[in-house]
Image (cartoon, helix red, strand yellow):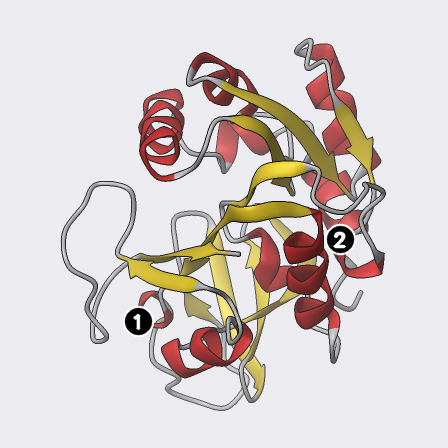
Amino acid sequence: MGPLERSRFYDQVAGVYDRQYAYTPRHSLRQAAWLARQCPPGRLLDLGCGTGRMLAPLAKAGFAPVGLDCSPAMLAQCRQAGAPALVQADAAQGLPFASQSFAAVISLHATLIHLTAPGELEAALAEAKRVLMPHGRLVVELPHPASFPPVCEPRGWRDYQSGMSCRNVGRGLEEMRLDDYQELTTLVRVLRLPDVQRLFQGWRRVEVHPGFRGGKFRLDKGEVIVVLAEK
């Protein structure tokens, strides 16, 4: 079996995702509090909402969240948890919302690295910008490139995070494997700071943060990159 397309990949793991792979509820609350300090209140679009782990913390933080995901099985988990505003769509194919309809758009937990086909990531960011109100904020969480282990042998599997392995399959591309499901893999993109700078050209203001705890971003080490961009 080759790498699965992103919606099929997440359909396969939806039932165990929160238990095995999601951040803790405490971390979700920390993220929501950080977003409340950085983003204007109002409607907020959660791109790649998954099982909806962020929707309740976002509502408690003062936002009116709308969850969007391309995986029907992930959205089914959201509905079981009682999430009220959900949409099934693929951001790279266009967002089903009017222009300037959200005060903020977020894409957390490395959602956007699954957009690996040429032009997909650029299209998704352009759509996020379109649906943002003037001076609206986009927040994107990405893996820090230093979080990927060094490539020791071509196409060899390396330990990535707990329960995950990866192997390099091309420039800027990794195949990610869930170790408990060794035939279940998908492609992801590795984004470095020059890639981020290119992708966010034309935004009014762009900041790069080392996560949601504060501190100074470093090029040589870190777990995540959090990009905050103002339209």
Name the quadrant of the N terminus: bottom right
**Residue 117 location, quadrant:** bottom right
Of 31 and 64, the residue lying toward us: 64
Residue 58 position (above or below residue 121): above
Q: Residue at x 74, y 20 (%)?
A: 85
Instruction: Check disc 1 and report the residue beneath it.
Output: 146
Q: Is residue 4 left or right of residue 17?
A: right
Tell me the CA gap for discs 1 and 2.
27 Å
Give the SS element for disc 2. helix
**Residue 214 location, quadrant:** top left
Q: Would residue 149 be seen by someone viewing this image from the given angle? A: yes
Of 168 and 29, the residue lying toward us: 29
Q: Which residue is drawn at 54% across and 52% down?
A: 179
- Which marked residue is nearer to the observer: mark 1 or mark 2? 2
Instruction: Check disc 2 and report the residue beneath it.
Output: 91
Q: For the residue carrying disc 1, how many other residues have a C-alpha within 10 Å: few (<14), some (14-19), or many (20+)?
A: some
Q: Going by the picture, which residue comes out furthest to the front?
A: 134
Give the amino acid type for the residue marked by disc 2 in the picture. Answer: Ala
Q: For the residue carrying disc 2, how many other residues have a C-alpha within 10 Å: few (<14), some (14-19), or many (20+)?
A: many
Q: Earlier in the sequence, mark 1 or mark 2?
A: 2
